[in-house]
Amino acid sequence: MTTQAPRDDHDESGVRVGSPKETAAGLPGVVHGLKSVLEQAGVRRGTRTLRLVNQHRGFDCPGCAWPEPGKPHLAEFCENGAKAVAEEATVRRVDAAFFAAHPIEELAGRTDHWLGQQGRLTEPVFRDDGDTHYRPIGWDEALDLIAESLRGLASPDDAAFYTSGRTSNEAAFLYQLFARAFGTNNLPDCSNMCHESSGAALTETIGVGKGSVSLTDITDHAELIVIVGQNPGTNHPRMLTALEHAKRRGARIVSINPLPEAGLQTFKNPQTVRGVVGTGTLLSDLYLQVRVGGDLAFFQAVNRMLVDADTADGDVLDHEFIATHTTGFDAAAAAWRALDWDDIATATGLPREALEAFLDEVRGAESVVVCWAMGLTQHKKAVPTIREIVNFLLLRGNIGRPGAGACPVRGHSNVQGDRTMGIWEKPPASFLDALEAEFGITAPRRPGHDTVDTIRAMRDGRIGVFMAMGGNFASATPDSDVVAAALRAVPLTVHVSTKLNRSHALAGRRSIILPCLGRTERDLQAGGEQFVTVEDSMSTVHTSRGTLRPASPRLRSEVAIVCGLARRVLGPHDPTPWEAFAADYSTVRSSISRVIPGFGDFEARVSVPGGFVLPHPPRDSLTFPTASGRAQFSVNDLEVLRTAPGRLILQTIRSHDQFNTTIYGLDDRYRGIRGGRRVVFVNPADLDALGVADGAMVDLVSEWSDGDRRAASFRVVAYPTAPGCAAAYFPETNVLVPLDHTAEVSNTPASKSVIVRLEPAESGLPR
């Protein structure tokens, strides 16, 4: 029952709005996931693929990074995981005939949904300066052209090497090795745009930029789980199963978010009878509707209340833990006591009673886990907010014991592994030292460009070659018009991809697309069939092994592409065994085991079903690799985000039919939206105050010192958002976020705190 790719783009005028749901998953989730698989891959290919998703001898889901349990369920995937597999296992093809029929200018006018639905890329293609179309090119010719361009640069720093989170550990390790052997640390990656704020805050406070909990901490031990700035029902659906396990053994769950989300209300687990025919499981015991950007003030207020309660009642704080394992408590406590309660109320939008209700939950729990995602990390004050969460955990000793800790929930399936492998523009000296000792190279020591700085460099004409290992750079980044112009001005852009996306349509003066194997596909090299490894959100490293026949005989693995290019660029006398690496990935893992701490005996340990867990000193032994050797309490200044009359605070969000920039479909059924994406959710009281009708067509306009930015033609949807706040989908609203509107310290685009006004639409709905 496979279907053809759409010939025409969708019409946004057909959007339908219904009531938001109060339950997630259940039988509808099964139906929608299987429907996508059957439409794109067919019955035989689709079912063969689904049975291996997240299994010990199968492949890691191309979607999110939520960890697998020790004994995976026979259907260890969610609705959106099934959609991700469907898009990779699809029988639709983007071949030479497709590119001959569609000029690049036409592709640039298509929606992200239409582009993604066309299917798998089948052969390398090239667009020369002045060409209107991509045309086929041989692998040798393509790699030679890229190598010639790289060798012709005035400086290695005139190149940038971007990485997506779907890149395997082996490919990521080789990619950064190649870039550093070439002579640059310009290694921007998708972490720069999502959890960079988490890594920065955690490194400052506990000495390790990763979460400190395991899956069993959540399922088996935590007494209170706080989910803040995260919508797991859409973005990490398998997390709902873990929350259900926790809830049914007696854990309490508090959700803190500007929008009520179905996935944190009632979960109907499709793997259980009660989830299919029963009422499901009520997850959240308490929902706090915080104002957008109010999370810092919220946790500061709670920390103040904990300190005050300890003074009044005693035995509220863990004084032994604070004295033995932390520093900076007195300064932090003094800052909390100086807080202005009016500022707290304005920033959070919450009454004092709501804070006290949360305080009661905290005081009643011996072990607390705090989970968060991009609802926290993409704000101007993202890093201080996460530091304040660490303060909250430290006050009652909720680090380094069962059922307690920090849980930043990563998005893409190996985004954390890529950073572990050295994909970072400012690596520590110890990593570079180990790299030099292993390979005999001289690694550059100057910091490179992160994602935002790479865009600035492209904009300013300082990048001669931009190479992306996966991802959809154009749709993932802010300030869409600036990024489009910057990409088109680069002398050579190179994209290693499985599918067509917007970045290919915004081609550089010369542009090459190199098609690669996907997670689902067999990887046969000279040394036999290969597997790769990934690291999940909770630091577990395990294998991923595809079984499908590749979509085209002309596909190459990411490892093979990197090795082939590296040999051409670095020359025949470069001592790195690129050919051996390409032939047998165990040789790559052997080098990784000697370069990266925690990977000793890599090959044997990862061959055990379920893999192995990387060391985490704060979690494992209450050892904090900070300058003081202790966990650090921090003082974080509160700046209340205030708006002028007639303005709203906009946050960008995902639709349920979406993962990052991949648009699976046009429905967000949990929020009641079908058939379109250009909608803006606004509280009914705010619409009344603004004099805007539900269903009206508006332009979203953000205001900045360098001028306004406009996202045209959005349908207003009355929705129970936090008062004074609005929400709309990305990438459609990325245009509203200036390149320089970034988080302090991490430089992550602050896409979750954009002040906008609504104006009557200047034009009709775009296609």
Image (spheres, grey):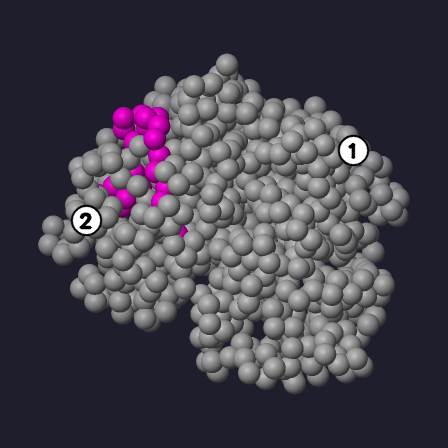
The residue at which mark 2 appears reads as 578
Q: Position of residue 443 (x, y in %)?
A: 26, 65
Question: Image height check: is 366 above or below 264?
Answer: below
Label 1: few (<14), some (14–19) or many (≥20) C-alpha neighbours in 10 Å: few
- Report the disc number at residue 19: 1
Q: Which residues are magenta?
A: 541-565
Label 2 or label 1, whichever comes before in sequence order? 1
At 69% from the left and 81% from the top, the residue drawn is 333
Q: What type is the residue that disc 1 sits on? A: Ser
* Direction from residue 149 to residue 196 in the image, left or right: right
At 84% from the left and 47% from the top, the residue drawn is 686
In which image quadrant can residue 124 be found? top left
Label 2: few (<14), some (14–19) or many (≥20) C-alpha neighbours in 10 Å: many
Q: Position of residue 643 (x, y in %)?
A: 77, 59
State the separation of the CA atoms marked 2 and 1. Answer: 56 Å
Q: Secondary structure at mark 2?
A: helix
